[in-house]
Every structure is written in C-alpha cells, then in structure tokens.
Amino acid sequence: MAKLVLYTFGVLQQPRDHEQINGFHDRNPFVYTSAENSEGFVDRSGNSWKRDHATRERDWGTRDVSPRFLTSGEHRDAPATLSLWEDVESVYAFTYYGFHAEVLSKRDDWFVKGDWPAFVAWWIPDDETPTRAQGAKRLEHLHDNGPTAHAFDFKAPFDAEAQPLRMDRGKIQAHAEIVRSHMRSEQHA
C-alpha cells in the first residue's frame, strides 16, 4: 500500500532565535502532538532521532537541503517538515483544523510571503522512506510545472494510482472532528 508524503517549507522573517518568531516555536509541540494524534498519520521526520539519538544522521536525509527558493544572504532560516500519511483527507483535516490551522492563520507574522508553494505532496511505496532532498525537488517541480501526480497540492490532488482525486468531504469532516477534539482536550489539560 502506498503512503502520502507531505513536505512543508517556509522562510522565516527573522532568525530562529528572534523574539518575533517565539510564537511559532511555542506552538510547535502542540502541532507535532496534534499530527501524531491525527487519524491517518503514519510518521514524521524528527520522530526517529527522539527515540534514538544514534539514528539522527539517517533521519530522512540531511537537514541542510532546501529548495532553491532559499536565497543565501537574503533569507534567514527555513523550517521544513516531512511527514507520512495514509490518505489526502487525513492530512488535509490536520492542516486546516486544530492547532495547525491556528498556526496557518498567523503565518504572516513569522514567514516571508514567497511566490513558491508552502507544501507539496506525493505518493511513495509503503517500503520507501522519503528524504528532505526529494521534498525540496518535488516542491520545485510543483512550482515550475503546477500540480501533477509527481508533485501536487490540495487544490489538485492525485491518488496513489496517479489519477486526479476528488477528496471525500465527509471523510475530511470526520477527521477534522477528531483533530478538534484533541485540540479541545489539550487546551483543557
């Protein structure tokens, strides 16, 4: 069975340790926990090194790879994430509901508004692990060519058989309710 890869990329307006960026960093633990508790979540880069520091070098590729949109001397830092999901609807619900949606609503406070895509998705075989270098290349491909089965977004998604996908709105809403439920329980904890 195939897995869906999601690679996100953004360029911070200030260095990582600047106080303007603190709100972004403060929310990261909640966003990661929300992802890990989401229906359809499989794994994310960064999880393995938390479990075993010896495997950090193999953490889905080097962290020093960025898409060509990061311009040395012009841009600050560029956070990127890489995660695996069972389906498009699950990651869509995670992205636009709950803690992650709240972060998206504030992205203009922390990130440079670029002409590049903020994320890219693609399918891989179940026994394959994506790399950050693949994510950077796929993001560039989406920017240059628009959505294809090789690299797509939520506006024009594809299924694991490389066919255009019409997302199941009922499935999205069911997943979104789970995401919102986790968010409410975290806020009351």
Image (cartoon, grey):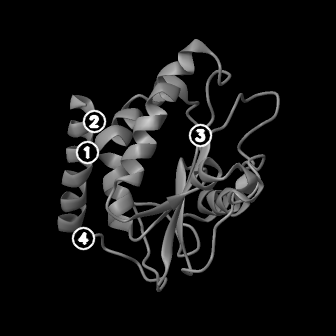
Tell me residue 70's x, y (percent).
73, 40
- The residue labelled by disc 2 is 186
Which of labels 2 and 3 is toward the front? 2
Q: Locate residue 53 relative to residue 171 in the image: left or right.
A: right
Residue type at mark 2: give it. Answer: Glu
- The residue labelled by disc 4 is 168
Q: Locate residue 154 relative to residue 11 in the image: left or right.
A: left
Q: CA distance from mark 1 to mark 4?
A: 22 Å
The residue that appears at 19% across and 58% down in the rendered structure is 173
Callout 1 environment at 10 Å: few (<14), some (14 to 19), or many (20+)? some
- The residue labelled by disc 3 is 10
Residue type at mark 4: give it. Answer: Asp
Which of the two labelled residues, at mark 3 and mark 1, occupies the earlier sequence position?
A: 3
Secondary structure beneath disc 1?
helix
Q: Is the residue under label 3 in contact with that under label 2 (CB below 8 Å)?
A: no
Q: Residue furthest right?
A: 73
Tell me residue 147's x, y (percent).
52, 66
In front: 73, or 127?
Answer: 127
